[in-house]
Amino acid sequence: MLLRRALAREHESDPTFPPARPAVSDGRPAFIHDFLSGEMSGLLPSNLNEIVDTLRFERYMECALQYNRYNNAKSIARRSYYLLRPLLPVAFRKHLQRIALKDWNKKAFPDWPVDFTTEDIFEKAFGSLSQALNLPEIPFIWYWPDGYSAGCVMTHDVETKAGRDFCGTMMKMEAQYGVASSFELVPEQRYEVPMELIEQIRDSGCEVCIHGLNHDGNLFSSEAVFFERARKINEYAEKWGAIGFRSPVLYRNADWLHALKISYDMSVPNVGHLDPQPGGCCTVMPYFIGSILELPLTTIQDYSLYNILKRRSLDLWKEQTEKILGRHGLISFIIHPDYTIARWSKQLYESLLEYLTELRIDRGLWMALPREVNAWWRHRQAMELVNGNGHWRIHGPEAGRARVAYASLKNGQIAYRVEAAEPACVLP
């Protein structure tokens, strides 16, 4: 917050920004490479938002999407696939998807398995501000409530009737570890969604979200289709009391999202190499798309882990989790009930829950519902850091849960220090 205000100044957005140059050897867009390497001078105050938004809104992907026929919304192959998808068993679908994604590991950008380019930019800005103001530390409002080191959300996209019927088992498994999660339900065609299920989810301390309209792969096929379906999605959201949304297959268009009457979205991957729509927001922190908060997906989906990479272990999830913990970001999972029914996958999910419980106890991980993360980031956005008599304090909603933090340069790297909670006032 302090950084944003210290850097802010009135300026008109340059219509030619970012500069139209090809990507450099590390795969990053050239202007981002220039910024992080120090070759772009004089743009920090006026273009920081443009640089970051180019990543978070995936604007660097526009040309690639325009010329990639496999990701074109009108692709005959894609339309045919989703028409036949309900009839195709997973064993056959995964072979088609491996063919479509066969060169995924040759993509240089975003970085795999987690991309921190946005965090790199902000830390570069912290360092520049510290040097420019000759300050040993830069104060700001810490990312998470109560001094937690990082955030974590567990989410479940429910794709089939079998998955729907397994939701109760998932909730019982999670309850043993003190974990609450969100269930993204498909309103039409895939299966019936009785109100008893919604009440069961809520009574278990979990959350209901909207998962598209009918999961046919065509939600973002055209603006007309999206806005027509958005009207129906909003009706279901109101009926179910849902404030969160995730698009099926993580298809997305940030420019259309405003049509949904939701508070937060969970449709943007950090790095999308293994998703039908490539790209990625290159951040592990929540961010706003207009009035909607985006909670990016920061770990690999269970389906991709099991069926594309053909792995049945926690190793990759642990690697991603450790990297995100190191940057104090949001660790978010998609575990489909549909793919957890088998004995081996159920045991693997229980192992994941046990691992996250250890991190919560030993590493200060905040396990929260998506709606709780949404509420916190909205409160944090409304907070203000105020200096009184040489001491920094936080004013605003939920300020009692907020912590003052300090960023400093140590051996060329950003280090953080988080203050303890303010002592409670005792009235005489």
Image: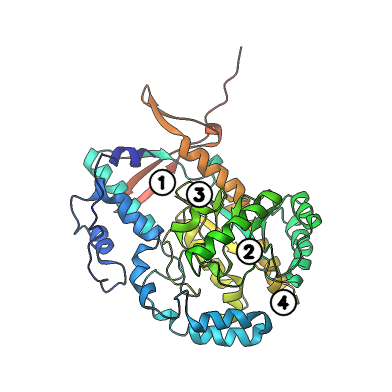
Task: Give the image quarter of residue 40.
Answer: bottom left
Label located before the other in sequence (3 or 2): 2
Image disc number at residue 339: none
Circles 1 and 3 in contact, beta carbons < 8 Å = no
Q: Please, what secondary structure does the residue beneath circle 1 have?
A: strand
- The residue drawn where x is 38% and y is 55% is 119
Label located before the other in sequence (1 or 3): 3
Q: Please, what secondary structure does the residue beneath circle 4 have?
A: helix
Of circles 2 and 1, the one toward us is 2
Looking at the rendered structure, the kind of residue marked 2 is Leu
Q: Which residue is mark 3?
A: 292
Label 2 Cα neighbours within 10 Å, binned few <14 / some 14-19 / many ≥20: many
Of circles 4 and 3, the one toward us is 3
- The residue drawn where x is 51% and y is 44% is 377
Q: Residue 327 location, x and y as percent?
A: 44, 55
In front: 411, or 180?
Answer: 180
Of circles 3 and 2, the one toward us is 2
Of circles 1 and 3, the one toward us is 3
Image disc number at residue 344: 4
Q: Is residue 399 left or right of residue 19?
A: right
Looking at the rendered structure, the kind of residue marked 3 is Ile
Q: Which residue is mark 2?
A: 213
Looking at the rendered structure, the kind of residue marked 4 is Trp
Label located before the other in sequence (4 or 2): 2
Label located before the other in sequence (2 or 1): 2
